[in-house]
Image (spheres, rainbow, N blue to C red):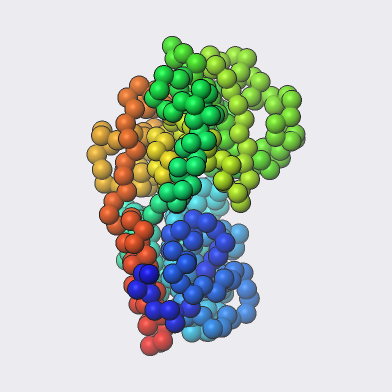
Amino acid sequence: MSGLDPRIRVATLPAAHPGVGRLTAFDAVDAAPGDILRDSGPISDVDVAHVHLGHDYLSVSAVERAMASLASSGVPVLLTVHDIHHPSDLEDPQLLDRVGALVTAAARVVTLTEVGALRMLERWDVAAAVVPHPRLLAESEISTAVRAAKHLRGDGQQRGEGHGPVVGVLLERMGENIEGPELLDKLAPVPTGRQDAELRILVESRSWQEAVGEEPGTDGDPLVSELAAEGDWQSVRLVTYEALDLGPLLPELAALDACVLPYRFASHSTWLELCRDLGVAAVFPDAGFLAEQWFSGHDPALFGGQAYNPMDPVAVARSVSAVLDQPKPVPPRTEAAAAQSVMAAYAQLYREVAAAGAAG
């Protein structure tokens, strides 16, 4: 399908992550799933080890041992760098050292944006290939979510059909990288003068329970009750989801006019790609390479979505208001992000890395 030699065997980390599968089109490779950095012993019967995520729990020395173990087994590593600074590692002093240990030991390095590649060249003198993120959702998933979203908005209406605007805030797992309740307060000006404006708080269910000490959906969610009582929102609703099953969340996301991703820091974001798939304007901080990922080289003045200054307390409300006042289509993906292009790019990288391993 992608021209990949079927004899090339690829071990991946993490093998089960849906974004990883979509990024590399794993139906086109002979995947030998394995947590290759967690194993202390060498792996066998593998031509390439492809590392994406899941190394943030390791120390620098553990990363170095794992990469040395792979090298001793004759298994070359292809590394896709999603985050140079990972959001959940905002306060981790070893983060850059850990990423650096992976980058400098890998046979080839890939990232999602040109600016991300430039940053790695500047810091580690490593030339990374750039392979943008393809669509995450299949056409059938998108159409199902959009149809279901009409019922969530009431009267079977879609975005822009006269119903009040619906704003979502993705609190995700409520980690130190997420500006949570304090950001919700900053959105207070948004519903003023907007009839029937609604707010949706999207949060991973276990994280919500750990944060507030209650099962999601029980009476007395203090944050939801306070926002509903004190704000001008027509309604405020808590939407919880399971981290490993985003299916039920997709209609909720598709029903939004704007989705706020309140990262304190991030390099790239899978949630941006979900918003793009579903045609939802994303509002995100001017941090990392998020703007470059979202606009993908297109003119920001022509497309929906806004980057805001996280240091300006009124910026996020201003950006959401701008998105609601002037609805625009989300920026399309570039030709290089088409599924076939991404599959072909990774097929070539697998061939190069496997050949280098065989020669070494």
Residue at 63% from the left image edge and 76% from the top image edge: 40
**Image position, residue 241 (x, y; %):** 62, 41
Residue at 39% from the left image edge and 25% from the top image edge: 160
In this view, which residue lies farthest toward the top?
193
In this view, which residue lies farthest toward the bottom?
359
Across the whole image, how many numbered discs are drawn on residues? 0
**Image position, residue 256 (x, y; %):** 47, 31
Between residue 148 and residue 39, name the one nearer to us. 148
87, above or below 165, in the image:
below
**Image position, residue 116 (x, y; %):** 35, 55
Residue at 50% from the left image edge and 51% from the top image edge: 86
- 223 sits left or right of 263 in the view: right
- 246 sits left or right of 80 in the view: right
**Image position, residue 227 (x, y; %):** 60, 20
187, above or below 300, in the image:
above
Does any portion of residue 203 appear in the rendered image?
A: yes
Between residue 138 and residue 197, name the one nearer to us. 138
- 6 sits left or right of 219 in the view: left
293, above or below 18, in the image:
above
39, above or below 356, in the image:
above
Residue at 39% from the left image edge and 34% from the top image edge: 281
Which quadrant is home to the N terminus?
Answer: bottom left
Does any portion of residue 264 appear in the rendered image?
A: no
Which quadrant is home to the C terminus?
Answer: bottom left
